[in-house]
Image (cartoon, rainbow, N blue to C red):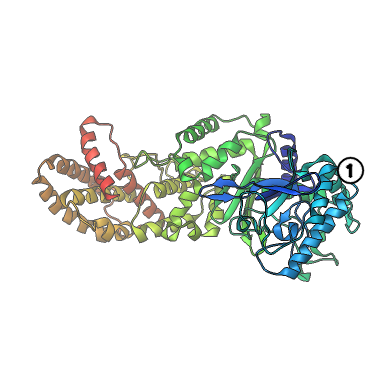
C-alpha cells in the first residue's frame, strides 16, 4: 500500500510542469563544481556551482544519471562523481584505491560514449585520455584545490548551455545501458503487477532525521535469517525496477531539504501527500509542523484560520475533492534501515475535518499576543520532554499523539501523565502546556460514548469559565489569585508559593490550601497599606471569597486529586492568570496583574 501510493505520487509529479523530478535512470545528486571542457577535451575552467546557505556554501542538487549503490567496492557513476573517481585524486591518501576508482570511471565513460557521434562525448573521452593525476593538481578558475578535493563534479562543454550528461544522445545511451541488465531476475512486481526485471537492490532514502547521511533503505534484506525460499536480497519482496525507481524518487522528493510536505514529529520524519493536488497539502505542514518563525507569521496564521473556517463549514462527502486519497507516512531511523513509525491513509475531506478538530482543540486564550495562535505539534510535544529538548520527546508518545490527531481518536493517557509530571517538576504552566491539556480533555469529552450532560469529563472552554464549578478547576483559579496577592504584597520576591507549593496544592489541596489562605491574610493586610494598591487588594480579596464560596458549596477542599483532576487544576490556574475581563471597571486592575505576570516571565 505504501509503495503503491508513492508510485502514484511519482506519476503525479511527472505530469506537473512546475516540478523537476528525475526520469527513470536519473536522480538528484549534490554537485559542487563543473569542469568546463573545450571541444578537443582541454580543461579550460572550473565553475563553482555551490549555493549560499546561511554562512556556508552548500552543494547544488542536480539531476544526474542515477547513483550506483556503493559498499566497500569500486563502482563509478556515469559522467559525475567525486574527485577520486573523476580526477584520480582525493584527500584520503590511498593512491592504489584512487587509481582503481579513476580507471573504473574512465572505463564506464569509454563503454557508453565511444560509439556516440556527439561533441560532448568526444570532449569527455579526450579529456580523460590526456588527464594525468597529480597529488595536488593545478586547475583553472578561482576555487582552490582544497575546496574542490573530494567534492562531486560534472562536465560542461565550453560555450554550450546545460551539462554534458543532459545532452540527448548521451541520455539515450545511459537509459539503454540501464535497461540492458542481463543479470536481472524477471518476475511479477508486487507494486504494479507487471512482469519485468526486478530490483535486486533499492536506492537509498535520504533525509530521514537520525538516519545515516548517505541514506538508508526502506526495503532490504541482508541476512540469511530474513530470506525465504532461497531468494536473496530484495528478491524476497519482488518490486520491479521501474516501480522501485518511482517510489524512491517520490519519497526522496518529499523528504528533500526545504520540502513543504515534510514535518518532524518526535523522532519520526513525517511526509504527507494527496493523490491529486489539494489545498490541504499547503496547510497541513504549517498547521502541524511549522517552525516558530512560521507559526508567528501572520500570513500563514491567516491561511490556517481560513482553512479552519472551511473545515468547520465542511465539504460534502460525495464531492470529488473530498474523496481524493490523502496519505501520511512517519519514518524513523533504525540502524542502516528505515522503520515505518506510522502510516495513515484517508481522504482529503476526512483529513480536513480531523485537522480542523485538532486546531479547535488546541485553541486557548493566549497569555501574550506574540505567542503563535496555532502552535505546531512538535512545539507542543516538547512540553512533555525533559529540559524541553526535542530529542527527549518520548518516541512512543509522539507516535500515539500523531496517530490520535490523524485518526480523530482520543489522545493517550500517557500524554496527560507526561504533562502533569513536567508541570509538577518545573512549576511551569504556560500557554503551550495549557493548549495541550485542553486538547486532551476536549477530545475525551467529544468521544465520550455516554454523551450525557453529566459526563465525568469537564468541558474546557477557550478562556476562563466562571460558570465552571468543578472543584479542581476552582482550586487552580484560587491558587493563581493567591499567588498574585503574594507577588503584589512582596514585590521582588524570588521564590513564590508556586515554587514551593504548586505540586502539593495540585495533588493534596486539603493539606496545602488552608496554609496558603492563612498566609494570604498577611499579604492582604500589607497590600491594603501600600500606596495605590488598596483597589487591587479589594479586587483580589473579593475574587478569593467568590471562589471559596463555590468550593465550599461543593463539599470543600478534596483530600487528594486524581491525575485528571490535577489537569483541571492546572487549566484553572492558567486561565485565571490569562483572564481578560469584559467589565471596564476591572480592566485597569487586570492590566496591572498581567504586567506582574510579564515581569515574572
Horizontal arrangement in the rendering, residue 574 relative to residue 152 (left or right)? left
Residue at 63 percent across and 37 percent down: it is 348
Residue at 26 percent across and 45 percent down: it is 550
Q: Position of residue 170 (x, y in %)?
A: 83, 44
Q: Position of residue 233 (x, y in %)?
A: 80, 63
What SS does tag 1 mark?
A: loop
Vertical placement of residue 489 versus 333, above or below = above
Q: Nearer the viewer, residue 591 or 199?
A: 199
Residue at 78 percent across and 65 percent down: it is 100
Vertical placement of residue 125 versus 539, above or below = below
For the view shown, which residue lies furthest in the left direction? 529
Q: Position of residue 563 (x, y in %)?
A: 40, 57
> How many numbered discs sit on the rendered protein?
1
- Tell me which corner region of the image, top left, top right, bottom left or bottom right, holds residue 427: bottom left
Q: Position of residue 389 (x, y in %)?
A: 45, 57
- Tell me which corner region of the image, top left, top right, bottom left or bottom right, holds residue 585: top left
Q: Nearer the viewer, residue 527 or 111?
A: 111
- Tag 1: Cα neighbours inside 10 Å, few (<14), some, or many (≥20)? few
Residue 470 appearing in the image? no
- Tell me which corner region of the image, top left, top right, bottom left or bottom right, holds residue 272: top right
* Residue assigned mark 1: 117
Amino acid at each position: 500500500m505504501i509503495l503503491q501510493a508513492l508510485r502514484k505520487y511519482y506519476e503525479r509529479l511527472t505530469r506537473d510542469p512546475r516540478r523537476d523530478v528525475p526520469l527513470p535512470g536519473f536522480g538528484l545528486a549534490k554537485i559542487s563544481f563543473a569542469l568546463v571542457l573545450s571541444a578537443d577535451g582541454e580543461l579550460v575552467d572550473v565553475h563553482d556551482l555551490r549555493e549560499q546557505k546561511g554562512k556556508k556554501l552548500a552543494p547544488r542538487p542536480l539531476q544526474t544519471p542515477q547513483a550506483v549503490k556503493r559498499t566497500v567496492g569500486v563502482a563509478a557513476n556515469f559522467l559525475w562523481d567525486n574527485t577520486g573517481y573523476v580526477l584520480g585524486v582525493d584527500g584520503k591518501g590511498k593512491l592504489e584505491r584512487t587509481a582503481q576508482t579513476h580507471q573504473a570511471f574512465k572505463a564506464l565513460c569509454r563503454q557508453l560514449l565511444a560509439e556516440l557521434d556527439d561533441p560532448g562525448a568526444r570532449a569527455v573521452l579526450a579529456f580523460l585520455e590526456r588527464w594525468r593525476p597529480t597529488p595536488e593538481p593545478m586547475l583553472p578558475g578561482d576555487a582552490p584545490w582544497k575546496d574542490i578535493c573530494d567534492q562531486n563534479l560534472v562536465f560542461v562543454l565550453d560555450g554550450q548551455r546545460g551539462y554534458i550528461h543532459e545532452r540527448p544522445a548521451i541520455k539515450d545511451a545511459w537509459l539503454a545501458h540501464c535497461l540492458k541488465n542481463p543479470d536481472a531476475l524477471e518476475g511479477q512486481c508486487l507494486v504494479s503487477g507487471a512482469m519485468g526485471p526486478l530490483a535486486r537492490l533499492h536506492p537509498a532514502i535520504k533525509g530521514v532525521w537520525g538516519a545515516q547521511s548517505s541514506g538508508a533503505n526502506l526495503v532490504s534484506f541482508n541476512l540469511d535469517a530474513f530470506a525465504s525460499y532461497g531468494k536473496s536480497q530484495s528478491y524476497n519482496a519482488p518490486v520491479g525496477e521501474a516501480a522501485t525507481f518511482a517510489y524512491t524518487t517520490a519519497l526522496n522528493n518529499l523528504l528533500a531539504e526545504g520540502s513543504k510536505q515534510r514535518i518532524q514529529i518526535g523522532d519520526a520524519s513525517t511526509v504527507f501527500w494527496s493523490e491529486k493536488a489539494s489545498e490541504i497539502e499547503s496547510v497541513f505542514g504549517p498547521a502541524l509542523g511549522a517552525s516558530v518563525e512560521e507559526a508567528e507569521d501572520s500570513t500563514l496564521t491567516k491561511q490556517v484560520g481560513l482553512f479552519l473556517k472551511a473545515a468547520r463549514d465542511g465539504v460534502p462527502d460525495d464531492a470529488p475533492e473530498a474523496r481524493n486519497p490523502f496519505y501520511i507516512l512517519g519514518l524513523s531511523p533504525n540502524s542502516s534501515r528505515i522503520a515505518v513509525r506510522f502510516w495513515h491513509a484517508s481522504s482529503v475531506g476526512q483529513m480536513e475535518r480531523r485537522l480542523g478538530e485538532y486546531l479547535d482543540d488546541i485553541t486557548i486564550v493566549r497569555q501574550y499576543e506574540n505567542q503563535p495562535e496555532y502552535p505546531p505539534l512538535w512545539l507542543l510535544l516538547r512540553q512533555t520532554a525533559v529540559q524541553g529538548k526535542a530529542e527527549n520527546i518520548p518516541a512512543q508518545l509522539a507516535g500515539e499523539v500523531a496517530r490520535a490527531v490523524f485518526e480523530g481518536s482520543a489522545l493517550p493517557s500517557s500524554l496527560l501523565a507526561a504533562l502533569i509530571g513536567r508541570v509538577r517538576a518545573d512549576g511551569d504552566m504556560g500557554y503551550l502546556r495549557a493548549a495541550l491539556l485542553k486538547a486532551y480533555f476536549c477530545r475525551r469529552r467529544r468521544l465520550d460514548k455516554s454523551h450525557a450532560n453529566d459526563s465525568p469529563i469537564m468541558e474546557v472552554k477557550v478562556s476562563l469559565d466562571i460558570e465552571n464549578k468543578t472543584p479542581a478547576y476552582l482550586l487552580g483559579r484560587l491558587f493563581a489569585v493567591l499567588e498574585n496577592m503574594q507577588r503584589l504584597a512582596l514585590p521582588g520576591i524570588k521564590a513564590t508559593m508556586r515554587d514551593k507549593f504548586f505540586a502539593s496544592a495540585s495533588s493534596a489541596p486539603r493539606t496545602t490550601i488552608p496554609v496558603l489562605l492563612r498566609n494570604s491574610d498577611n499579604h492582604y493586610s500589607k497590600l491594603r497599606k501600600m500606596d495605590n494598591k488598596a483597589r487591587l487588594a479589594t479586587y483580589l480579596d473579593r475574587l478569593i471569597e467568590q471562589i471559596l464560596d463555590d468550593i465550599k458549596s461543593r463539599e470543600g477542599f478534596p483530600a487528594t486529586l486524581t491525575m485528571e483532576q490535577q489537569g483541571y487544576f492546572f487549566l484553572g490556574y492558567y486561565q485565571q492568570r490569562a483572564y481578560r475581563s469584559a467589565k471596564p471597571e476591572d480592566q485597569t486592575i487586570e492590566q496591572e496583574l498581567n504586567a506582574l505576570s510579564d515581569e515574572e516571565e
